[in-house]
Amino acid sequence: MISPYDLHSHSTASDGALSPADLVRLAAETGVTHLALTDHDSVAGIQEAIEAAHQHSVQLIPGVEISVTWEKKCFHVLGLHINPDAPSLAQGLKRLQILRRERAEKMDANLEKHGIRGALQEVRAMAGEGMITRTHFARFLISHGYAKDMANVFERFLVRGKPGYVSTQWADLEEALEWILKAGGIAVLAHPLRYKLTGAWLRRFLTAFRSNGGTGIEVVCGNSTPVQIETCADYARRYRLMGSAGSDFHDPAFPWIELGNLAPLPPGVTPVWESWRS
Ligand code: AMP
Ligand code: MN
Ligand code: MN
Ligand code: MN
């Protein structure tokens, strides 16, 4: 089922395979009428996406997916309906962009220790002006035969304790929320069940998130099962968070996630888009 709203997607400004304009064109072809572009720690693709959206009668919602470290754990917080030119957001993202460049160098050095050479040069070429992410390193490792597919890479490389992993102190939760709120946006916890946290940790996080101004949670994700959707809907109701729906689309070559292929939000969950539609 194609949802008219898809509020989580990536372009070549980070680890997506499509340019912002091509992503918007795909949204239009697919039947997504409201698309949020949410690249990792970057708003560089938004202007191009807005221009393409005008041509294709798509409503483009400016967004960003901010990398956050809270209690030594990494979380992804989406800023939706932001002003991409807001100064505090721009400044904050600049710091994360420097961190990403430094991390890429450390990841390359770590891979080299394990006998894997030449990653940095290739991931830089792949990313171009965009953010370098673990996805780029994963593509490098697959194309050189070190792993057979994405799932395999993230089992054997790039995760804690494995070659290529580098621990990074991303933005603090409080500051990331402040950048989003000052940019006039809504802060949404991305893919709540992908952090492999216990319920107790997720509840602690949501309490901190809520008390620092977070108001949304992704209830429907790209490959959510009905049980996962109900679990997230329950968090939304219990913490009085609005619900979002986003595929986290990256690449047409990853068949398990299609743009706009999202179940409807369950009853009793207020859609985030109502807050900017009114
Ligand atoms: P980074 O923000 O640079 O640490 O990279 C995180 C990105 O890596 C995510 O946004 C995904 O696109 C990708 N990623 C992480 N884990 C997996 C996985 N298990 N399978 C596929 N992609 C993954
Ligand atoms: Mn990604
Ligand atoms: Mn994410
Ligand atoms: Mn994402």
Image (cartoon, rainbow, N blue to C red):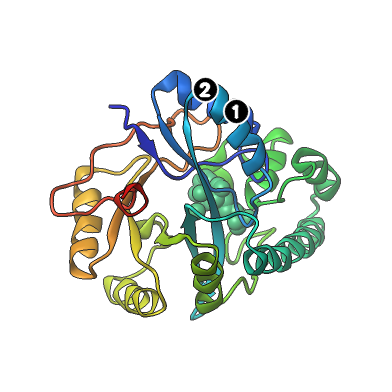
Q: Quadrant of residue 237?
A: bottom left
Judging depth in this view, the residue of 157 and 248 nearest the camera is 248
From this viewpoint, is residue 74 visible? no
Residue 45: image location, x then y, percent = 66, 42
From this viewpoint, is residue 47 visible? yes
Residue 69: image location, x then y, percent = 54, 73
Residue 258: image location, x then y, percent = 43, 30
Judging depth in this view, the residue of 148 and 223 nearest the camera is 223
Q: Residue at x 65, y 41 (%)?
A: 47
Judging depth in this view, the residue of 129 and 106 nearest the camera is 129
Give the structural element (helix, strand or loop) at label 2. Answer: helix
Above or below, comparing residue 214 to residue 107 in the picture: below
* Residue furthest to the top: 29
Q: To which residue does mark 1 refer?
A: 52
- Quote the CA–CA distance across marks 2 and 1: 6 Å
Judging depth in this view, the residue of 53 and 162 nearest the camera is 53
**For the residues bearing labels 2 and 1, Cβ distance under 8 angstroms:** yes
Q: Is residue 142 left or right of residue 112?
A: left
Q: To which residue does mark 2 refer?
A: 56
